[in-house]
Each structure stands twice: as C-alpha cells, then as structure tokens.
Image (tube, grey):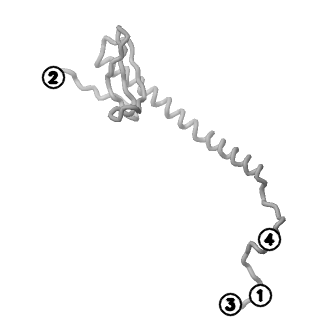
C-alpha cells in the first residue's frame, strides 16, 4: 500500500490543553443518579412482587401444616429465618392457647406445599 502522508491515528498530543470535556462533572453526576434510579425502578418491583408472593405462599402452606400437625392451635405464623443454618428459609410456627409458639415445619427457601408425613404408623 502506498503511504499518502496522512496520519489516521489519534494521539493525545493532537489536542490542546484548554479543550473542555464533552460533559461536565455535574452533568455526569446527574446522569449517574438518573441511571441508578432507573435501574432501581426496574429491579425493585420484581423484588417486592417476589417477596410478597413468597410470604403469601408461606402463610398458606403454614396454615395447612398447622391444621394437620397442631389442630388445636389458635394461629399459624410463617417467618423467614436466616439465623439458624439448619433452618434457613421459611419456617412455620403454631400459636397455642397459652401464648406459646411451637415449631411445626420447615417450608424451605422457596415455600411450597408442605410434605405432610403421618405422625403415627397407622
């Protein structure tokens, strides 16, 4: 190929020191804020819908488990637990007449229908 004498590369020396950037720091800050809010607006509804769906499913599954395992209980409580490694996820508790809460079933991280195992051999 012939050299036409035209340099097509761009070097830092081609620009003068007093040239301004394309966007000011203030505008860049505002753009970052707007983009962050837009991403949060896209992600947050999905997280909230997922959490409320899981809470509702856990409450229904817990009421089924309490009706089966503790028929004399006054109430059923489903709670998300991360403190005990063996019971991470949704757990079901039965509220008794004396105000005590009794553990009934582990529903898992993604709650579903509880596996109801008969308590007696018959």
Residue 100 screen position, x and y as percent: 35, 13
Q: CA distance from mark 2 to mark 3?
A: 91 Å
Q: Are marks 4 and 3 in contact (CB under 8 Å)?
A: no
- Residue occupied by mark 1: 5
Circle nearer the N terminus (4, 3): 3
Q: Secondary structure at mark 4?
A: loop
Q: Given this view, does label 1 or label 3 mark the residue nearer the observer?
A: 1
Q: Quadrant of the C terminus?
A: top left
Q: Given this view, does label 1 or label 4 mark the residue nearer the observer?
A: 4
Q: Quadrant of the N terminus?
A: bottom right
Q: Are marks 1 and 4 in contact (CB under 8 Å)?
A: no
Q: CA distance from mark 4 to mark 3?
A: 29 Å
How many neighbours does mark 4 have within 10 angstroms: few (below 14), some (14-19), or many (20 or more)? few
Q: Residue furthest right?
A: 18
In this view, the residue in front, 38 or 25, is: 25
Circle nearer the N terminus (2, 4): 4
- Residue occupied by mark 3: 1
- Horizontal placement of 11 versus 49: left or right? right
Circle nearer the N terminus (1, 4): 1
Residue 86 screen position, x and y as percent: 32, 34
Mark sitting on residue 121: 2
Q: Secondary structure at mark 3?
A: loop
Residue 5 screen position, x and y as percent: 77, 87
Q: Secondary structure at mark 1?
A: loop
Report the residue at 78% width, 59% height from top: 22
How many neighbours does mark 2 have within 10 angstroms: few (below 14), some (14-19), or many (20 or more)? few
Mark sitting on residue 15: 4
In this view, the residue in front, 73 or 83, is: 83
């Amino acid at each position: 190929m012939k050299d036409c004498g035209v340099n097509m590369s761009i070097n830092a020396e081609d620009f003068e020191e007093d040239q301004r950037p394309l966007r000011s720091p203030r505008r860049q800050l505002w753009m970052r804020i707007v983009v962050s809010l837009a991403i949060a607006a896209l992600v947050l509804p999905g997280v909230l819908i997922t959490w409320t769906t899981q809470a509702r499913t856990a409450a229904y599954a817990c009421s089924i488990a309490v009706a089966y395992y503790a028929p004399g209980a006054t109430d059923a409580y489903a709670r998300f637990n991360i403190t005990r490694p063996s019971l991470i996820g949704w757990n079901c508790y039965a509220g008794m007449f004396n105000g005590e809460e009794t553990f009934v079933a582990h529903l898992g991280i993604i709650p579903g229908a509880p596996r109801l195992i008969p308590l007696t051999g018959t």
